Image (tube, rainbow, N blue to C red):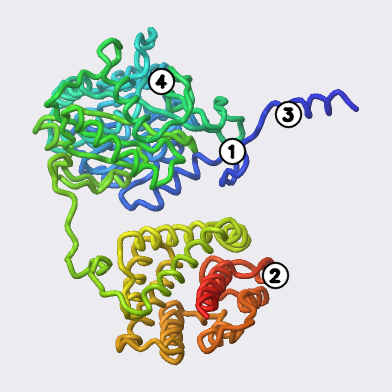
Amino acid sequence: MSLLLHIYLLLTSLIQIKKHCLINSVDSCVDEALCGLVRASGGLALLRGHRVVLRSDPSNLRGKVALLSGGGSGHEPAHGGYVGAGMLSAAVAGGVFASPPPASILAAVLALHDAGASGVLLIVKNYTGDRLNFGLAAEQARNHGVAVDMVIVADDCAFDQPSKAGRRGLCGTVLIHKLAGALAEEGRSLDQIVSKMTEVLKGIGTLGVSLSPCSVPGCRPSFDLPPGDMELGLGIHGEPGIKRSKVASADEVVKAMLDHMTNPASQSHLPLTTGDTVVLCVNNLGALSCLEMAVVTRAAINSLENRGVAVARTMSGSFMTSLEMAGVSLTLMKADPETLRLFDTKTGAPAWPNLSAASVSGRDYVTDPPTSSTPPQDSKHAEGPLSPIMRKALEKICSTLLEKQEELNSLDRAAGDGDCGNTHAQAARAVREWLQGHAVPGRPGEMLSALAGLVQEKMGGSSGALYSLFLTAAAGHMTDGRSDAAAWAGAVHAGTQAMSRYGGMRAAILDEDPFLLRCLHGWKDLPAASGAEATRSLTARAGRASYIAAERVTQPDPGAVAVAAIFRAVLETLQEQE
């Protein structure tokens, strides 16, 4: 084997290139991303020859202070997504996680100056590369006669004793974009804006936590984090944090973050006391689901309120990301009426969320439903001659479904999400609990109606809706108190018709095999599973299985198996009574 081949194999083993990155090429991804942002936003434009996003209405900057920010790419929507009236006038981008070059920063400053801006404020995150490159461009701009000033954002609360470089600039930068942009839109001077932002920065703090690393396109992950671990206090480029631990619950993680952010023993803490009012920013670092973000947002609001801190505004979403990192950062900004006024002003920036100006804390956020919408599960019904046998049948059904939980889950994994057994077991446990505290109505229609309400509330999913439809329609055909075979057959027919009508499907287990209908007229020596087995050869017309190729679905339908088991349990109960 040649030396070059040895070297190639060694390099490919060491460099674990990120896979499944939906780009065209590593070299062009930043430029194409900026182009995509601008093409999708009518209020934005690109500065030819530079990675600079500008407002497309430069004439509206005349006589006002222009705001310029930026940094490495990979933090989208920062910073290009915050260009617009009421926020940034322009944003300059570097390569992924790389500071933008001074030439592009200067080009952006001069473009804003030429548009008639009275001055240019540079909003810079506290990273050495950004400070040097923006600083150099600022000096060059002054030599061109441009009034330039700079605000350094250093809101990181991670380190008890920050290094000489100081605290890192994180998501608090976005809040400075908003407040400074509102002041600039009002025509405030450069000195006034700098003074106000310097004051506001004293009350901003941010801390992040990560559940996974991120990968610059074409490179290996930025750091190693074993599955099940999390890292507290890391930077937005994957810089090391302050502590690693096992992943805990959202409530516990949020509490730990807020405890650390506000710990007076830390030199970088955010002073926060009972009675303070804050703006809360819950920032997705890239790969958390919307569901997880909502859970974290709830935890953060509750934790702050439990500390006696009022949450005036909350923004939750992706504001300053770290590529595909699974993690979240919390930013707190101490707020007074003037800060909230600036925060609430409208902006045309495409990435700024459409927020309510109502206070989060103190708002009644739960509305009671109308009483008529509550299923009448707790209605008192009189028992009758059929109550004992119906109770035994229900108990038999519950035990059967609980025994078949894993079997149904296994069948469902072939064509669904693998939870059919869990769903039926959940319903079985709910019915068992109901039986312990309720009399079984003597009239079958009332019993079916009670079960319909119970299943609707407790079972959930498509199965819950289908069973509740079946039971509700069946109950409506047994209101006269009849309980003979013909009445039951009519009720079952009505139930299956309702399922077909609203579900857009045929009740296959009844259509393909007359077993269940024959159960209603006699119950001796009938093959309970034959109808369910027939579903092996059927093509799914609804539900998740309908999206899977028929040749891949070779097992009986788990729902049909469950229905067959239910009817078999009823059959066996009736046979025991003979």
For mark 3, what is the residue?
Answer: 13
Neighbour tally class for label 1: few under 14, some 14-19, many 20 plus, Cα within 10 Å: few
Considering depth in this image, is 499 or 228 the residue closer to the camera?
499
| Amino acid at circle 2 | Glu
Left or right position of 14 against 238:
right
| Amino acid at circle 1 | Val
Considering depth in this image, is 492 or 443 the residue closer to the camera?
443
Neighbour tally class for label 3: few under 14, some 14-19, many 20 plus, Cα within 10 Å: few
From this view, report whether residue 8 is shown above or below residue 42: above
Q: Secondary structure at mark 2?
A: helix
Q: Secondary structure at mark 4?
A: helix
Displayed quadrant of residue 76: top left
Outermost residue toward the left in this view:
337
Task: Look at discs 4 and 1 and give the one toward the viewer.
Answer: 1
Comes first in the chain, label 2 or label 1: 1
| Amino acid at circle 4 | Asn
**Residue 245 point in image, percent of width and height:** 47, 23
Mark 3 → mark 4, Cα distance in angstroms: 35 Å
Comes first in the chain, label 1 or label 3: 3
Mark 4 → mark 1, Cα distance in angstroms: 23 Å
Neighbour tally class for label 4: few under 14, some 14-19, many 20 plus, Cα within 10 Å: many
Mark 4 → mark 2, Cα distance in angstroms: 60 Å
For mark 1, what is the residue?
Answer: 26
Q: Is residue 63 visible?
A: no
Mark 2 → mark 1, Cα distance in angstroms: 39 Å
Q: Secondary structure at mark 3?
A: helix
| Amino acid at circle 3 | Ser
Outermost residue toward the front in this view:
578
**Residue 133: numbered disc:** 4
For mark 2, what is the residue?
Answer: 551
Task: Look at discs 3 and 2 and give the one toward the viewer.
Answer: 2
Mark 3 → mark 2, Cα distance in angstroms: 39 Å
